[in-house]
Image (cartoon, helix red, strand yellow):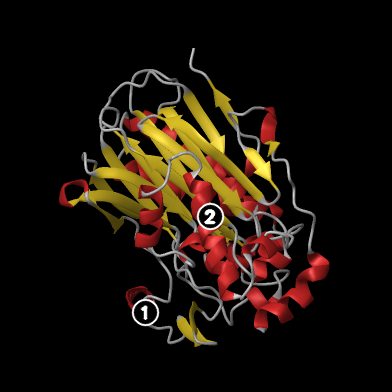
Amino acid sequence: MVGQTMMRIVRPCFKPSLSDAQVVGGGAGVGTRDGLLWYKDTGKHACGDFSMAVVQANNLLEDGSQVEAGPFVIDGAQGPCGTFVGVYDGHGGPETARFITDNLFNHLKKFATEQQTVSADVIRKTYAATEEGFLNLVRKQWLIKPQIASVGSCCLVGVINEGVLYIANAGDSRAVLGRIERGGRDIKAVQLSSEHNASFEAVRDELRQLHPDDPRIVVLKHNVWRVKGIIQISRSIGDAYLKSSEFNREPLLARFRIPGPFHKQILCPEPSILEHRLCAEDQFVIFASDGLWEHLSNQEAVDIVYSSPRNGIARRLIKAALREAAKKREMRYSDLKKIDRGVRRHFHDDITVVVLFMDPALIGKRLYGGPLLSLRGGGGTPTLAQKC
């Protein structure tokens, strides 16, 4: 069987499984690590409960993520407040996703403070400032670390403020709403995010319209559509080598360089943005990197959340995806769990999941009186502070 052959190949890469979960950061309010899995089973955000989990597959975790709750203004005075979620699916390395985690929310607070509101314009400026900051970092490190020009990240953001949910996306991560229908008997999956992946004909058409003089702007390679035959996504933060010709040269590795200079950026950092006024039928939103959606459909994921306890639901979604990944390779889930990072990437991607539940009594509040929350997925120096 294929599964038995694969097991013989990867058995030397097995590692002992951890029987006792380790708490990251020394407190139950921070998160728990169990082998390659990190999770925060339950917590409170500005508008209800949340659950968060990350599983690593690459040698270095390339996903970044965060949940923030509290004021969206720098000085903490009266102004816009609510919940912020970010899922950053990195590729080529962890640097871009880490940079976004460190900087994007701070930019959002800066622009929300200036305009005293959260809006689509504030979010667009936030993405643009984050992109500019990372490209400046690439310029500074170009001579000593040229490979950073080939690192990028998808960027999915959700913001809840005064009863409005903003969904912004660049790349192919996904936000899916679970909405009650038929008097509470059914739950419907509603995809809120637009995906920017060349596998979609509409994305290929958009690229051809933007680059009418480039017949090879999208190329079918090994039955997969890729931008310039290199990358599947058409929008991202980072990927400087496809944003400016100044990085399309040595000392960048030859496999990332494209023939000749280009005068228009090939990939776009601008997000697609949706504004949705939340209502009583809107139960929860699943934010996840594409590693989850590779194995679960929108409706499958929503059904799991709706039919399961809230506590640990993000972890349950990841386990459901991993069981599907194991089944595709004719393996047992218990054997997949024993495969170490790096080799694990042959079976599934890094996966990040955040599930936000909405309390109708809280989603429209203008003032925030709850605990300040700042939590980073994967155990990367997260903090959880109580408001004075």
Residue 87 shown left or right of residue 119 in the figure? right
State how far apart marks 1 and 2 are (Cα): 36 Å
Q: Quadrant of the N terminus?
A: bottom right
Residue sticking out furthest to the left:
183
> Which residue occupies the foreground of this view, 265 or 353?
353
Element carrying mark 1? helix
Residue 189 shown left or right of residue 141 in the figure? left
User: Which of the marked residues, 1 or 2, is nearer the chain's N terminus?
Assistant: 1
Label 2 crowd bin: few (<14), some (14–19), many (20+), radius 10 Å: many
Element carrying mark 2? helix
Q: For mark 2, what is the residue?
A: 318
Q: Give the residue at x 50% y 73%.
A: 232
Can residue 271 be seen here?
Answer: no
Q: Position of residue 377 (x, y in %)?
A: 58, 43
**Closer to us: mark 1 or mark 2?**
2
Q: For mark 1, what is the residue?
A: 208
